[in-house]
Image (spheres, rainbow, N blue to C red):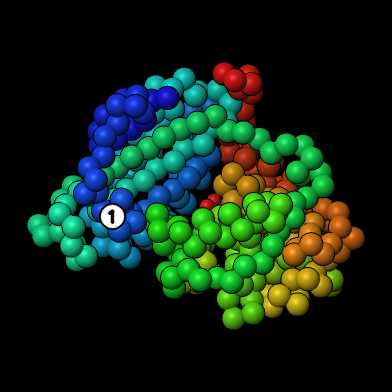
Amino acid sequence: MLVYLDGAVLPLAEARISPEDRAFLFADGLYEALLARDGRLLFWREHEARLRHGLDALRLPLTDPAGLEGVAERLLAANGLVAGEAVVYLQVSRGAAPRAHAFPEPAVPPTVYATVKPREPHPADRVAKGVPAITVPDDRWARCDVKSTALLANVMAQQAAKEAGAHEALFVRDGVAIEGSHSNLFAVRRDGRLVTYPACNYILEGVTRNEVLRLAGALGVPVELAALPVAELRAAAEVFVTGTTTEVLPVTTVDGRPVGDGLPGPVTRRLREAYLARLDELWPLRAPLAPGA
Ligand SMILES: Cc1ncc(COP(=O)(O)O)c(C=O)c1O
């Protein structure tokens, strides 16, 4: 696999980052994960806007965030990922400097790293049956709107999910289920209203979340941006999670108890279909990638 590092495209095994890089020492960095189709990025404008929000929040001086679109597309081409779906990972750190908590002075060049890989679609079973989720206490920092590489709490939560045989861990803050370890959380109340936590500093404003909210509006599904106490999550008719690689994925058990009738519900299915149709509208696939290609 060829990766991008600070202006060069090179084999992963040859990529070298300083041990003084602040992403290594302090998790002082940001990232984005995007979907590409036929070598082109989907929702780049939205991902770039979120990256700029993080750069401003962390006062991280990356001069040309817009240029990362070209970097990613160059890397996709260099890896031959020009047909079918791929996942692009972009990371920016504050750069390498002798270890001290405050920003280096003068500023050093940010480290920019990118990788691409073929997209692995969900196994058919996962979508047809839905996935189990567990709830975990949200012990993250209070700037979850920043897509920071400081993901240790997310790592611990996802590991807990894995060990419990679940697909996702849902963070609970003050008794309210707010989002997943790497996804946004939605529930459909028994009266048909779709509910998700309002965008604020406690969740990541997912690109997929926003698209799903827009599609729900277009389909006439009533939407409520509100807190969902765990008791209401458990009583929901449907639950699903969203994300760039997660798409719209039904959650059919929470903490071992079935959601609704234990099967993916009609609102989830409609929104999933609408979301996939939207991707096709943005960039219809020319040719699916052969397995192992
Ligand atoms: C904590 C968290 N919430 C939500 C999401 C979903 O965001 P998006 O739809 O932009 O991929 C992610 C994606 O990685 C995430 O890490």
Q: Quadrant of the C terminus?
A: top right
Identify whether 105 is placed above or below 7: below
Residue at the image point whose x is 46% and y is 59% from the top: 152
Q: Is residue 219 left or right of residue 59?
A: right
Q: Is residue 226 visible?
A: no
Q: Is residue 140 visible?
A: yes
**x, y (%) of residue 268?**
77, 55
Q: Quadrant of the N terminus?
A: top left
Identify whether 53 is placed above or below 199: above
Residue at the image point whose x is 34% and y is 27% from the top: 13
Question: Residue 183 is drawn in which quadrant?
Answer: bottom right
Q: Is residue 239 left or right of residue 163?
A: right
Give the SS element for disc 1: helix
Question: Residue 99 is drawn in which quadrant?
Answer: bottom left
Q: Amino acid at mark 1?
A: Leu
In the foreground, 166 or 274:
166
Identify whether 87 is placed above or below 184: above
Q: Which residue, as the protein is rendered here, is positioned at the far bottom?
A: 174
**x, y (%) of residue 278?**
65, 43
Image label count? 1
In the foreground, 208 or 105:
105
Residue at the image point whose x is 48% and y is 28% from the top: 39
Quadrant in which ligand 1 is drawn: bottom right
In the foreground, 127 or 167:
167
Q: Is residue 18 left or right of residue 4?
A: left
Residue at the image point whose x is 68% and y is 42% from the top: 276
**x, y (%) of residue 130?**
78, 50
**x, y (%) of residue 179?**
60, 64
Q: What is the crowding at mark 1: few (fewer than 14 residues within 10 Å), some, or many (at least 20)?
A: some
Task: Name the residue carrying label 1.
Answer: 25
